């Protein structure tokens, strides 16, 4: 599953894959500039959800 996800992210231009010709072969992955942009946005979304969770839980408890 991880390998399929990485292949999809590479095909979408979000991840760069580099194969090192060593024994055993070594593969390195890195975010592309577009991948960095998406990661930043996702990080901001996670932070926003984290910040509002106390209020969400308060509203749930009072319902």
Image (cartoon, rainbow, N blue to C red):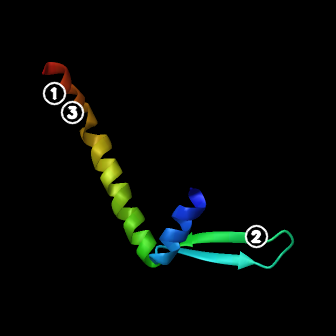
Q: Please indicate whether residue 37 sits to the left or right of residue 60 in the image.
A: right
Q: Where is residue 52 in the image (x, y as percent from the top left)?
A: 24, 40
What residue do we see at 44% from left, 71% from top? 35
Residue found at the far left of this picture: 63
CB within 8 Å, label 3 to label 1: yes
What residue do we see at 28% from left, 48% from top? 48
Q: 29 or 52, which lies in front?
A: 29
**Badge 1 local density, few (<14 within 10 Å), some, or many (20+)?**
few
Residue tagged by mark 1? Answer: 59
Residue 63: name its quadrant: top left
> Mark 1 falls on what kind of element?
helix
Gap between marks 2 and 3, in whole Å?
45 Å
Residue tagged by mark 2? Answer: 26
Up-down: is 24 above or below 2? below
- In front: label 2 or label 3: 2
Q: Which numbered dot is residue 56?
A: 3
Which numbered disc flags the more N-terminal residue, 2 or 3?
A: 2
């Amino acid at each position: 599953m991880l390998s399929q996800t990485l292949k999809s992210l590479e095909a979408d231009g979000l991840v760069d894959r580099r194969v090192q010709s060593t024994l055993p072969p070594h593969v390195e992955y890195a975010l592309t500039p577009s991948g960095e942009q998406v990661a930043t946005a996702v990080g901001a979304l996670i932070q926003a959800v984290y910040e509002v969770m106390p209020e969400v839980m308060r509203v749930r408890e009072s319902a």
